[in-house]
Image (cartoon, rainbow, N blue to C red):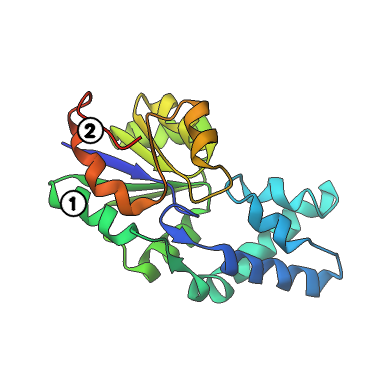
């Protein structure tokens, strides 16, 4: 059976304003300066890695807990679908395939985001990053993984799946192609046309 994994932030979900709002709250509550534009420019890695840019190591766990405590209230209502997200998910399901969301975002907030956007996915696996996503992708039998970060290409490799890189995050098409993505798209609106290539490797792709 066809099974396709998708990253969440900046692949299916436009969380830039949403995440910015949470960091604004943390800055207001703590009095610590946080460069919100810098935060939003490098979405993808685990939360704790970003928080370490702004807080001493001993405060990072507390700040991560506070971030997650307010995320659903503040961020989820500000989240938008990325262009083509719904059609990409539907294209897999229309082929009788399964859709798996595998993300570094924690499980609770990942599920809340998917639910808010009304994305018809079969499974959500939160708390995985880079090659660590391979575990979840293998568990669900994913044959391809779509994401916006070079770490998502690592994830696909770790799972033995084909990588579909979406240039909607911090890396442009050239960088994603140079890193070794199997297929590179400017955004998810071209994803339905890639399914023939994913199902039948060797047919013309949209690189």
Q: Nearer the viewer, residue 181 or 89?
A: 181
Residue ID at (42%, 25%): 157
Residue ID at (86%, 50%): 56
Q: Earlier in the sequence, mark 1 or mark 2?
A: 1
Residue 101 picture location, percent across and down: 37, 49
Report the mark closest to the observer, 1 or 2.
Answer: 2
Residue ID at (82%, 47%): 57
Q: Which residue is mark 2?
A: 197
- Crowd rating for badge 1 (residues with CA inside 10 Å; few <14, some 14–19, many 20+): some
* Residue 121 disc label: none
Residue 59 picture location, percent across and down: 81, 54
Q: Nearer the viewer, residue 86 or 58?
A: 86
Q: CA distance from mark 1 to mark 2?
A: 16 Å
124 with respect to 92 (left or right): right
Residue ID at (34%, 29%): 162
Q: In which image quadrant can residue 73 be found? A: bottom right
201 with respect to 164 (left or right): left
Q: Quadrant of the C terminus?
A: top left
Residue 102 picture location, percent across and down: 42, 45
Helix, strand, or loop for circle 1? helix
Residue 146 picture location, percent across and down: 38, 42
* Residue 93 disc label: 1
Q: Quadrant of the N terminus?
A: top left
Q: Nearer the viewer, residue 42 or 158?
A: 42
């Amino acid at each position: 059976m066809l099974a396709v994994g998708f990253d969440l932030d900046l692949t299916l979900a436009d969380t830039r304003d949403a995440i910015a709002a949470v960091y604004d709250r943390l800055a207001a509550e703590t009095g610590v300066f946080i460069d919100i534009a810098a935060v939003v420019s490098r979405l993808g890695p685990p939360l704790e890695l970003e928080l370490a840019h702004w807080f001493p190591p001993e405060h990072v766990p507390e700040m991560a807990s506070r971030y997650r405590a307010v995320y659903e209230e503040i961020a989820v209502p500000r989240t938008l679908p990325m262009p083509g997200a719904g059609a990409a998910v539907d294209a897999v399901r229309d082929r009788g395939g399964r859709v798996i969301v595998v993300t570094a975002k924690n499980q609770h907030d990942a599920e809340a985001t998917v639910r808010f956007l009304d994305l018809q996915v079969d499974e959500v696996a939160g708390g995985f990053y880079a090659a660590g996503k391979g575990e979840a992708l293998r568990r669900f039998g994913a044959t391809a993984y779509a994401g916006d970060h070079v770490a998502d290409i690592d994830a696909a490799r770790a799972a033995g799946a084909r990588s579909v890189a979406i240039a909607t995050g911090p890396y442009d098409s050239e960088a994603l192609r140079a890193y070794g993505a199997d297929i590179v798209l400017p955004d998810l609106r071209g994803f339905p046309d890639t399914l023939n290539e994913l199902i039948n490797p060797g047919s013309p792709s949209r690189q």
